[in-house]
Image (spheres, grey):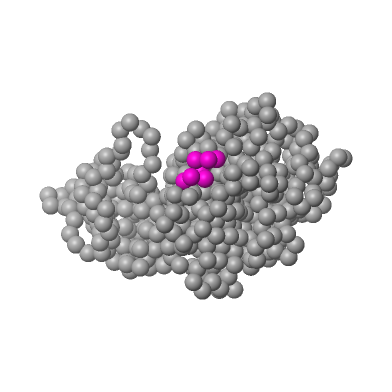
């Protein structure tokens, strides 16, 4: 598929804001098309097919609404139309917002993963983008390419993506790159006393892994640590989940996949950030060897944790990675995890939770996301008093507290393992990693919060 910036096509898409005076009057008069948000009208003429695509009221347009229009229009037409070439005219859209519409278009056009006998037939060979700067188009393409890598990993069912598969895929992604990949198997995990990962992974026949990715650009000006939760399937373990709650749990490695996608992008666009990325991989299953409720895990840093719920496994594997992070200098550490259902109860399906041991950093991060990206985030408090809920009679900590405020106690648990003096942001992405009502990908992986983290690193972190 080629992307061009000029040329003729038999199929042309024109975007219009609501009630734009340039919308042909017969369309408005007959009530066919007014430019309402995600209103599309296909007009077949002798030599040209036109698609009119509505963007809604101009002053209500957001990065989210544009990204959504991009994915929706591709889904509405592109399998039905057998065109080889299509053009999109961006004349009406401000340059700084065209990125998001392009991202939406590319995410849908280039998403290729499927397991059906018949592949979707897409005949498209050429895309012509008119009236926007080529560098914005290239950038949107790079973002969507890395984001689709995340989405395809998350959408892969758990029988095809067990911890060793994920380790192999990560190695393959970075094979010809400047990113060094170190893969630790169970023997190495035992030697390094990664007791959280080993405990959670014990119930599965597919052994757990730990991955360390290292990226040093030529002239780094900042240092970052990324940590991603990689539970390739979460049955809940002996604290078994009901079937409905298990359905999306192939995506319990979305944090890990997002870390992979971020490195994939950052190397491509040459951000001057040295990154150490840490990814614990395990499958949380049931067997005679599975870890039990009431087990006590003794961590390498001397802390002990009483397991009171085997379904709160994410924080147990992240604890190992957080302890290990002490080895690396950093200006910022971000962990990404589909961590708690409680975060979804608090914020719903679209908004992810942001915690930080530096409150202002967390609030600023969330404000940036809401103002400048297509994603939604909200800063939640690390309210110390709730730490009382994690007191155990037999160990230093329990792995869960009471039901209320469960995303906060989970974050407080992680904080216990964050090395001193490290600035840290924790993103609880249990809500939006899958599209359960967000309205961009209909029941598929979203790649959220890839866009917000990438833009934050570029526009805030590097400029601080
Ligand atoms: Zn779980």
Q: Which of the pair 297/414 is nearer the observer? A: 297
Q: Is residue 181 on the magenta stretch?
A: no
Q: Which quadrant of the view contains residue 6?
A: bottom left
Q: Is residue 224 left or right of residue 267?
A: right
Name which residue lies at 36% across and 44% down. 112
Q: Is residue 173 left or right of residue 427?
A: left
Q: Is residue 141 above or below residue 270?
A: above
Q: Is residue 120 above or below residue 110?
A: above
Q: Which of the pair 44/271 is nearer the observer? A: 271
Q: Mark yes or no: residue 61 visible.
A: no
Name which residue lies at 12% across and 49% down. 46
Q: Is residue 407 left or right of residue 33?
A: right
Count of labels in the image = 0
Q: Mark yes or no: residue 106 visible.
A: yes
Name which residue lies at 38% across and 41% down. 113
Q: Is residue 165 on the magenta stretch?
A: yes
* Quadrant, the C terminus: bottom right
Question: In the image, residue 45 lies at what x, y percent?
Answer: 15, 50
Name which residue lies at 35% across and 49% down. 110
Q: Main secondary structure of the magenta part?
A: helix
Question: In the image, residue 399 lies at what x, y percent?
Answer: 75, 42
Q: Which quadrant of the view contains residue 133?
A: bottom left
In the image, farthest residue toward the left: 46
Question: In the image, residue 94 lies at what x, y percent?
Answer: 38, 67
**Magenta stretch?**
163-169
Q: Is residue 190 above or below residue 36?
A: above
Question: In the image, residue 217 lies at what x, y percent?
Answer: 50, 68
């Amino acid at each position: 598929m080629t992307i061009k910036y000029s040329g003729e096509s038999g199929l042309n898409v024109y975007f219009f804001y609501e009630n734009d005076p340039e919308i042909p009057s017969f369309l408005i008069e007959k009530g066919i098309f007014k430019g309402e948000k995600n209103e599309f009208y296909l007009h077949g003429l002798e030599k040209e097919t036109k698609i009119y695509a509505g963007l809604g009221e101009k002053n209500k347009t957001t990065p989210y609404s544009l990204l959504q229009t991009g994915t929706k229009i591709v889904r509405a037409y592109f399998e039905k139309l057998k065109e080889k070439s299509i053009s999109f005219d961006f004349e009406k859209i401000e340059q700084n917002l065209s990125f998001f519409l392009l991202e939406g278009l590319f995410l849908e056009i280039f998403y290729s993963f499927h397991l059906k006998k018949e592949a979707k037939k897409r005949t498209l060979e050429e895309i012509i983008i008119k009236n926007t700067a080529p560098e914005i188009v290239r950038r949107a393409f790079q973002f969507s390419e890395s984001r689709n890598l995340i989405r395809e990993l998350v959408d892969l069912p758990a029988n095809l993506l067990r911890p060793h598969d994920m380790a192999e895929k990560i190695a393959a992604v970075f094979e010809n790159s400047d990113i060094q990949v170190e893969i630790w198997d169970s023997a190495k995990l035992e030697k390094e006393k990664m007791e959280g990962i080993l405990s959670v992974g014990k119930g599965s026949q597919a052994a757990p892994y730990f991955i360390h990715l290292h990226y040093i650009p030529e002239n780094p000006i900042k240092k970052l640590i990324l940590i991603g939760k990689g539970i390739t399937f979460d049955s809940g373990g002996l604290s078994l989940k009901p079937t409905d709650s298990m359905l999306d749990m192939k995506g319990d490695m979305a944090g890990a996949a997002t870390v992979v996608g971020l490195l994939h992008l950052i190397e491509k666009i040459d951000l001057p950030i040295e990154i150490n990325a840490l990814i614990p991989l395990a499958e949380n299953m049931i067997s005679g060897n599975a870890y039990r409720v009431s087990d006590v895990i003794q961590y390498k840093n001397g802390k002990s944790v009483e397991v009171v719920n085997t379904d709160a496994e994410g924080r147990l594997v992240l604890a190992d990675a957080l302890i290990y992070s002490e080895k690396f200098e950093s200006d910022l550490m971000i962990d990404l995890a589909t961590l708690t259902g409680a975060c979804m109860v608090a914020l719903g399906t679209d908004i992810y939770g942001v915690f930080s041991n530096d409150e202002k950093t967390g609030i600023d991060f969330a404000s940036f996301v809401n103002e400048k990206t297509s994603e939604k985030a909200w800063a939640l408090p690390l309210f110390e008093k709730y730490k009382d809920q994690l007191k155990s009679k037999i160990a230093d900590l329990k792995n869960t507290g009471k039901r209320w405020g469960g995303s906060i106690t989970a974050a407080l648990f992680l904080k216990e393992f964050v090395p001193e003096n490290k600035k840290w942001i924790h993103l609880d992405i249990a809500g939006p990693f899958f599209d359960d009502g967000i309205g961009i990908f209909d029941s598929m992986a979203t790649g959220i919060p890839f866009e917000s983290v990438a833009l934050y690193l570029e526009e805030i972190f590097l400029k601080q």
